[in-house]
Amino acid sequence: MSLEIIPAPSPNFDARTAPPDMIVMHYTGMETGEAALARLRDPEAKVSSHYLVEEDGRIFSLVAEERRAWHAGRGSWRGETNCNAVSIGIEIVNPGHEFGYRPFPEAQIAAVIALTDEIRGRWDVPDNRIIGHADLAPTRKEDPGELFPWKRLAEAGHGLWAEADPAPGEPLAEGAEGVGVFALQAGLTRLGYDCAPSGKFDQETRDVVTAFQRHWVQTRFDGVADGLTRARLMAVIRAGAAST
């Protein structure tokens, strides 16, 4: 059965240059869903998404999937730097870290899963290209954040998730240098982040580690690569390789 989608057209779109093969999850980061919907449809704002999912599970369609919505902005994932051109953006109503970040209701997540099901029925979107806004823009964005149930999504068949016991060794943090940092950066790059290995744990590396933790660790998101973070990274990379 098809989902009930509420039309709410936005003028903020242009032509695609390639079929979509990525899904980007966002939170709205505004005080109400109504305010977010209005902004995504405001021609002066010059932002949009393909869909908006309210906390009660209602789904609004703003931009046709065949068109490019303006949701991702500057960023990179798996070498793709024009993420708007190849992605479908889903805005999920939540006040975000600025206005009172809170868990995502069951009805909302069920709707996100059902919508993702339908999108993937129309387009070829690999699991390793179902990501959060923070994954492609870790120095700028935090959404959808550490409360978003990525594990639940993966259990429903969408995206990557993996468990792992903590790896041995001291945590790696900003200021560290050496082969361990190089290996960490190489792993993050292999997964999809823009984190060229240098062997120096700088601020950008910390931001990338934080984004990874918000998605795949969620019990800590301080940018310190402890044993659990490093083990999860390797496990998620293996899960991604097994899914291709």
Image: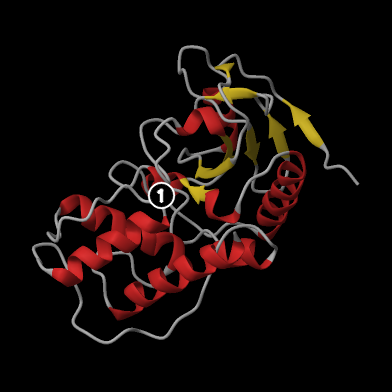
In the picture, measured across the screen, residue 175 lies left or right of residue 154, that is left
Residue shown at the point (48%, 23%) measured from the top left = 47
The x, y position of residue 34, in whole percent, is 60, 32
Nearer to the camera, 225 or 198: 198
Please, is residue 208 above or below residue 81 in the view? Answer: below
Name the residue nearer the viewer: 89 or 142. 89
- Display coloring: secondary structure
Rendered residue at 49%/61% (across/down): 147
State which quarter of the image contains the C terminus.
Answer: bottom right
Q: In the picture provided, is 34 more to the left or to the right than 111?
A: left
In the rendered image, which residue does mark 1 sit on?
135
State which quadrant residue 186 falls in.
Answer: bottom left
Location of residue 73 in the rendering, given as x and y in whole percent from the top left corner:
40, 30
Dot 1 surroundings within 10 Å: few (below 14), some, or many (20 or more)?
many
Which amino acid does the dot numbered 1 rest on?
A: Asp
**Residue 172 shows in this picture:** yes
Q: Nearer the viewer, residue 59 or 216?
A: 216
